[in-house]
Image: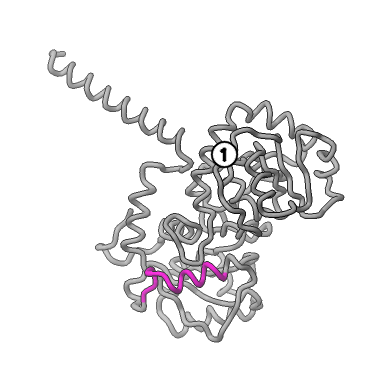
Amino acid sequence: MSTASFSLLLCLSFFTYTNVHSKLLSQLTSPYLSPTTIIPHYQNMLEAFKIFIYTPDEAFTFNSSAESLFYASLQNSPFVTHDAEEAHLFFVPFSSNLSTRSIARVIRRFKETIPYWNRTLGADHFYLSCAGLGYESDRNLVELKKNAVQISCFPTPDGNFIPHKDISLPPLASSQAPYAPANKTASFLCYFRHGGIKESILVKELVNDPDFLIESQPSDLLTYKERLATSKFCLFEYGADVSGIGEALRFGCVPAVITDHPIKDLPFMDVLRWQEIAVFVPLGVVKELKHVLVRTYGDRHEQMRKLGVEASKHFVWNELPQPFDSFHTVMYQLWRRRYTIRYPRRSTV
């Protein structure tokens, strides 16, 4: 091998090593699954994404505040187009209280009167359903459930969420505590707001441990903020009240989620590295929870806390949407789920 060839090979090897090392470093210091692509992809979404909203048969309402806020934000956003031919996705609106038979009639009407559903059997459509839809025998509901993107509330009942297709809305915080930088001096290992369920097995197991602060409700928002900011971990039971998980992240309190099975409907699962910003503890090891938090996550806590604070902006709901807030991050997930691209001129990023 000539000296020139060897030098070229050495340069290429060094470039490859540097590139790989840079990617690994960015992943270790970022809460995102794809830290190098989220910004350009997000910008592409802002510039190009178009949604066509079908006209509902009648006025309707949603059961949850998060659904209502998302729909209002969508209606008033620049993503909406009145030209269906330029739309990337189509939104099918119907009330949260609508029966499955009535939903089937809605889909049937769109199929008979509007051509867009039939081109993809609904694969470029999405809808809101807080509890999610189960499996039904009606063909229209089968197409809606299997093909269209469902946006539901977190947590979604078992069987009503299809991973990698469906999206869950981050919970709307029950109380908006005023923000302040997290206190690095933790007074408690773990904080648990149990919502008044005093007979909870979890409460009984932990209530006498001085490292755990357990209460049904803090006296005021300032106290709540202090609880979050001075605790290393914040405990949540999957399936119960998880409304404070975004605020826990914001105040540097690493969420510790008790669950009896792998969670498939976490908000922003294809955006955030959840394993780096939260702890997931099997229900069967609750008695060993303290040891799990101290031994397994003690050394990693500070890094998880920092990544969680950075990720927390995605869990903020605003009446007037702001960059990277809950509304825009849900829209970003929809943008990444574009199934049908009818025009070569459209971006495939």
Q: Label 1 is placed on what type of residue?
A: Gln
Looking at the picture, how far across and down is residue 208, in whole percent?
85, 37
At numbered mark 1, what does the secondary structure look like: helix, strand or loop?
helix
Magenta residues, start to end:
68-81
Residue under the point 56% across and 50% down = 179
Counting other residues with Cα less than 10 Å from the Cα at mark 1, is it few (<14), some (14-19), or many (20 or more)? few
Image quarter of residue 332:
bottom left
Position of 40 relative to 63 (above/below): above
Res. 143 visible in picture = no
Quick check: 188 left or right of 302?
right
**Depth check, front residue: 81 or 172:** 172
Residue under the point 32% across and 57% down = 44
Looking at the picture, how far across and down is residue 66, in whole percent?
58, 65
Residue under the point 36% across and 74% down = 81
- Visual colour scheme: one colour
**Depth check, front residue: 131 or 301:** 301
- Whether residue 74 is in magenta: the answer is yes
Looking at the picture, how far across and down is residue 96, in whole percent?
63, 74
